[in-house]
Image (cartoon, helix red, strand yellow):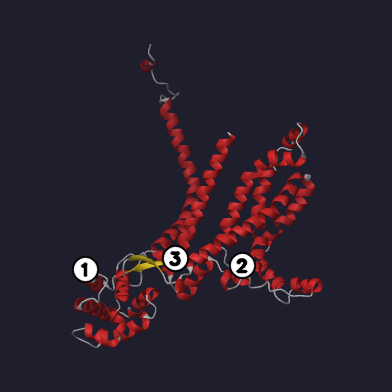
């Protein structure tokens, strides 16, 4: 008899075995889904939705959308080079009148001022003027009020800000802007963020290297000590986690200041005091101390699982101590080194408190400017764009790490 002609296997109650197994598998998956559903909802509400909101704010003209519709329509056919015609001035006057009645003219001026410095006073003045007018012509009134209204760049800014979505915040985050011929670099005195990102990567890289240099020997010591001694030493490694980040940073502020203990010691030894607070040196030292356990612990967890017999076998085959360590032991620690360095580097990219307290003006990182635009300037779009770019960079680093780890596993396999 052919296999296809055989009767299906049945359970004791007459149900197909395949159907019963499928039902049991479906029930198991539903139970697993029910267990992870609270965590998924928590991540969705507290992480994914805020991320989506952040991305939305970085591309939307929140202050001007729906308030410059007439102006947007009038400028749709404008060449972007010459002074607009009467229709554009009349449309802007109508939009400003309507915004003034709803007390929204200040929001429009604030948004234009992001791209065109000094626009707030110009908009407030012309809004008061056109609100008193019933009919035009408006072009002459605008130009007589201030010659800035004849600047095509201001009108290009108004056109860019009158649509629903904008690329201004993202372009500004990499020191670019819309010009008469398309995208162009901002003036050198306004170029800020490329230097800030470079500074952020440099500080994060230096701190990562220093934590690796300091943490690797300690991890090796912990992994090779007897359990009772290693546990005692591990307490000292974990001790910083029992203290607030703010407290540790404040402690470094006290240590590094001009009248602090470190300068007192330096004066006793070399009869000189050094400027260590509000410097790049102080920022790196404090961050290295705070980040050291995050590099050390992944390395230690990998070293702890490396059998000592591997090195003993290499030694028994004639390899010297250093050769056995470098060729046999060290390659097995690479996954821990990669994980620890990646964790430290990513955490350093988002540092805010430590550079703000012990660093100088030229030691601030991207997170400082995110907080600055959120709390001081109240420019949520710019803050969201800076945060989104930092998030993208972090995700790219994580993707590259996974690729490298995958390649290493294939080689080991």
Q: Is residue 233 above or below residue 146?
A: above
- Residue found at x 45% / y 71%: 188
Label 3 neighbour load within 10 Å: few <14, some 14-19, many 20+: many
Residue 246 in view, yes or no: no
Label 2 neighbour load within 10 Å: few <14, some 14-19, many 20+: many
Label 1 neighbour load within 10 Å: few <14, some 14-19, many 20+: few
Marks 3 and 1, Cα distance to the nearest angstrom? 29 Å
Q: Is residue 173 above or below residue 118?
A: above
Q: Nearer the viewer, residue 182 or 142?
A: 182
Residue 333 in view, yes or no: yes
Marks 2 and 1, Cα distance to the nearest angstrom? 51 Å
Question: Residue 301: horizontal and vertical position, in percent?
Answer: 67, 46
Q: Nearer the viewer, mark 2 or mark 1?
A: 1
The residue that label 1 is drawn on is: 77
Q: Quadrant of the C terminus?
A: top right
The secondary element bearing badge 3 is classed as: helix
- Residue found at x 42% / y 22%: 10
- Residue found at x 39% / y 74%: 114
The residue that label 2 is drawn on is: 354
């Amino acid at each position: 008899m052919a296999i296809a002609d055989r009767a299906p296997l049945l359970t004791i109650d007459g149900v197909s075995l395949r159907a019963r197994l499928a039902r049991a598998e479906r029930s198991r998956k539903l139970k697993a889904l029910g267990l992870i559903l609270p965590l998924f909802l928590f991540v969705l509400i507290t992480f994914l939705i805020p991320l989506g909101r952040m991305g939305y704010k970085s591309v939307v003209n929140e202050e001007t959308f729906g308030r410059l519709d007439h102006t947007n329509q009038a400028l749709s056919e404008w060449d972007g080079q010459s002074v607009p015609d009467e229709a554009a001035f009349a449309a802007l006057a109508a939009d400003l009148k309507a915004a003034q009645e709803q007390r929204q003219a200040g929001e429009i001026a604030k948004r234009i001022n992001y791209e065109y410095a000094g626009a707030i006073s110009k908009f407030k003045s012309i809004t008061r003027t056109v609100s008193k007018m019933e009919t035009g012509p408006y072009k002459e009134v605008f130009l007589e009020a201030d010659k800035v209204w004849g600047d095509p760049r201001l009108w290009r800014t108004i056109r860019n800000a009158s649509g629903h979505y904008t690329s201004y915040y993202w372009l500004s985050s990499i020191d670019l802007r819309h010009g008469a011929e398309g995208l162009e670099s901002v003036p050198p005195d306004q170029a800020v963020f490329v230097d800030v990102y470079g500074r952020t990567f440099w500080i994060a890289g230096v701190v990562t290297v220093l934590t690796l240099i300091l943490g690797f020997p300690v991890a090796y010591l912990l992994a090779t000590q007897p359990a009772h001694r290693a546990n005692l030493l591990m307490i000292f490694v974990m001790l910083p986690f029992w203290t607030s980040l703010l407290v540790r940073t404040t402690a470094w502020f006290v240590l590094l200041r001009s009248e602090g203990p470190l300068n007192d010691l330096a004066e006793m030894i070399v009869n000189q005091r050094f400027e260590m607070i509000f410097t790049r040196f102080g920022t790196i030292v404090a961050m290295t101390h705070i980040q050291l356990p995050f590099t050390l612990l992944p390395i230690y967890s990998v070293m702890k699982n490396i059998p000592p017999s591997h090195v003993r076998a290499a030694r028994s085959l004639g390899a010297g101590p250093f050769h056995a360590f470098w060729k046999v032991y060290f390659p097995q620690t690479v996954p821990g080194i990669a994980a620890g360095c990646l964790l430290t580097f990513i955490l350093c990219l988002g540092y805010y408190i430590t550079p703000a307290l012990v660093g100088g003006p030229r030691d601030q990182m991207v997170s400082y400017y995110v907080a600055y635009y959120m709390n001081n300037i109240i420019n949520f779009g710019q803050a969201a764009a800076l945060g989104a770019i930092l998030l993208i960079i972090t995700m790219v680093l994580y993707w590259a790490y996974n690729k490298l780890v995958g390649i290493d596993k294939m080689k080991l396999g």
